Structures are given as structure tokens and as C-alpha cells.
Image (spheres, helix red, strand yellow):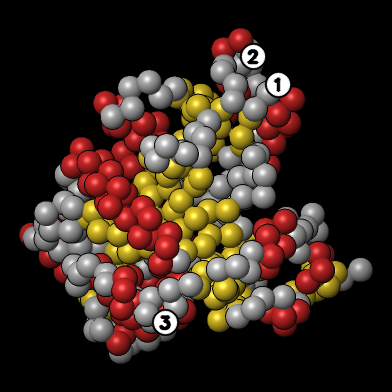
Amino acid sequence: MFLIDEPFVSDFLIDTIRNNNFKIIATKAAKELIKDDSLLWIEEGEAISLLKKDSQISIYSNSENVLAWIDQNYGEGELSSQLKILKNKVKFRELIKVLFPDFYFKQISIDEIHRLSINEIRFPFVIKPAIGFFSIGVHIVKNEKDWIKAKSELHPEKLKSIFPENVLNTNNFIIEEFIRGEEYAIDYYYDNNGNAILLNVLHHIFSSGTDTSDRVYSTSKEIINRYKIELESFLSRIGKELNLKNFPAHAEVRIDENGKIIPIEINPLRFGGFCTTADLLGVTLAFNEYKCFYENKKPDWDTIFKGKENKVFSVIILDNNSGILPSDILRFKYSDLANDFENPVLIRKLDINKYPVFGFVFTESSSNNKKELNDILTSDLRKYIVSKQ
């Protein structure tokens, strides 16, 4: 059953729901986002009744905005408890403390940040909202100079967003030790037996050791095969701590040079935000993560990547790091952007005055072509922006 909400739903996801006659809950938000009476709409009361009667019915959502709807309509059952633990980074760390007993973390309010003594923290560390999204308010702090800079950004007026408080709440933060290694994002689900089934593994590429942006995520057959067994085993262990079954999720982890996996977070009931990572292989290779989850199937990676074994598939998030205010931007030159990529399969345009990004690029590139990804990773996007002045 699909539970759709603001801020964004892709045509690819809507087509998936329509073409497979999947059930979709007729919330006010969903009906406003999707003007299509041909979908298999289920009234809210009926959906709630079905979900409470049958724990085998799974829910997929495009947005964490739905967490408030679930909390309001689903009561204090197991699902609500699971969501509250996964969404709160402090509660999540407490849950997995038995697996990582030496991992350092502490909760702190936004007011306490500015009173915290330098002697009370250990460098290097990461500070981020305990309930967060889209890397807003995330800082890597390696020394006292970084800490002074981070504190200058950690004020309520600088952390405003379009997201509701159950998705992004900047009243409380978590300080945790810096996890070394390469970062990966994983779309996956827990099947009927609670086993983790991988649907994609993406290398989250950064421009520097202090970069926290969400600009480039890349996947390939080689990346998936390299980590599939270890990640499924690792995520299954975490899932068993919460009894997760028929449950989609998007995990972020770091893997060090010795192959040790340490989780950053697990986002519940969805894959990558804004229909990004979940649409990537659908747009480029016709592999549909949503359908695979809904039908409780395992991907056949040999078939999915047949003829594309040496290709890299990336989703590029066009966040506005230009320093130019959205209100001062006349237009974005998407055609010029497309010309800078080997094979831009799809450019999904968004209104920068409505969303925190210009849009998304879904690309296919040769494995030896790293320049285009490195260029966009470090770009301030100014070359594509036409200002009003």
C-alpha cells in the first residue's frame, strides 16, 4: 500500500502505482499531489482498518511527512514504536549500542551547543539534528576552528526548512564520533521473515573530508556485488533488534578499509528521498525497486546489468550552493548542464523557489569517466544560473 505525501512525488513512481494497480491511500495530500482518478485509491478509514487487521500488509512512502499521519492514525502499536526509534538518531544509537558498545555519542539541545565547553567534546566528531533530513544542519568538526565555524551556522534562524518537525527538528542534536571510511547509501527492504533484501547500493561521493553535501551518489554492478552479502547480513541483524518485516528502508553506512560496517542512520518506510535513488535504476535500466519490494522479490543483478556491466549510474542532486538567493535567480540552464555529461538519461527540473534544489540528474557514464562526476561534485553551479541582475 502506498502512502504519498509532500513535498515531491515523481512521474516514475506514479506510473508504477498506476501500471501495477497498486493500492494508494487517499489522503488529502496524496490527492492534491496526484490528479488521477484511475489509480486504485483506498479511503483512509479502510486503509487504517486493513493495516491494523493484517500485519503482513506493507507500506511504502515517498516522504517522511507521512510519519505524522501514521502516528495519528496507527496508535501506539509496534509500527509507531519502530518509526520513532529509527527516525530519532539518539534512540537509534541507543538501540544498536549492544552491537557497537564503544561508539561515542551524546544528545545536546541547540541552546546547549553554544554553552558547551571545548573540554566536554572529543575531536573529530559529527554534529547533526537528532531528527534530520537532507543533510541540513550536519557538520564534520575536526578541530576547534571547525567547531567555531559550525556553531556560527547552528542557529534556529539559519536552519529553517520546508520540512515538518517530525522530519526535521533542529531543537535537539546528536554529537557522535566521526566514522572513518567510504560512505554508502542502501535502498533495501525487510522481507516476510525479517531478512534484508538489497535493491541498490550507492557510493556517496564527497569533495573533501569535511564535505557533508548530498551532491553525487553512484552505483554499478561492481559496487553492489562487492558489498551485497555483508550488507544484507549486517542490516538483517539490526532489523531483528526491532522486529522489522515487510518494511522498506534507506540506510546510510560507512565502510572502513578493513571492511567494517558502521551505520550512520536508517530511514524508515522509504528509499532515497525525493524519489532519487529508488528511481535511478528504473530510469536507466528499467529495474523497478518499488515493484520488487511490493512483490517481495530478490533482484537478479546479472539480468539487470546485462550489457551494462562496466557502466556507472549516478543521481546528482542540484542543491543551491551558489550563494545566490533563489529570489535573485531568473532561470537555470538545464541544456548547458546536460551538455556536460556523457549520457544524461533524465534531468528532472524543480522550482528552486519551492524546493531546496534545482532538480536531479540521472546519468549513465563509463567506469573510466570520473571527470564529469568530479566536476559536478565541486561545482557551485553558477555557470548554469542566470541571475535577475
The disc labelled 1 sits on which kind of residue? Glu
Q: Are the residues tagged 2 and 1 within 8 Å (C-beta)?
A: yes
Residue nearest the viewer, comparing 84 with 255 = 255
The percent position of residue 366, horizontal first and vertical second, equals 57, 73
Classify mark 3: residues with Cα within 10 Å, few (<14), some (14-19) or many (20+).
few
The disc labelled 2 sits on which kind of residue? Ile
Quadrant for the N terminus, please: bottom left
Q: Is residue 302 left or right of residue 52?
A: right
Q: Residue at x 58, y 60 (%)?
A: 216
Task: Kindly identify which numbered label has been placed on residue 144.
Answer: 1
How far apart, in angstroms, are the residues tagged by discs 2 and 1?
8 Å
Residue at the disc numbered 2: 118
Which of the two labelled residues, at mark 1 and mark 3, occupies the earlier sequence position?
1
Quarter location, residue 100: top left
Q: Are the residues tagged 2 and 3 within 8 Å (C-beta)?
A: no
Residue at the disc numbered 3: 307
Quadrant for the C terminus, please: bottom right
Which of the two labelled residues, at mark 2 and mark 3, occupies the earlier sequence position?
2
Labels 2, 3: front one: 3
How far apart, in angstroms, are the residues tagged by discs 2 and 3?
55 Å
The reply to whether residue 210 is visible in this rendering is yes
* In the image, residue 8 above or below residue 197: below
The percent position of residue 381, horizontal first and vertical second, equals 76, 64
The disc labelled 3 sits on which kind of residue? Gly
Residue placed farthest to the top in the image?
119
Q: Is residue 345 left or right of residue 375?
A: left
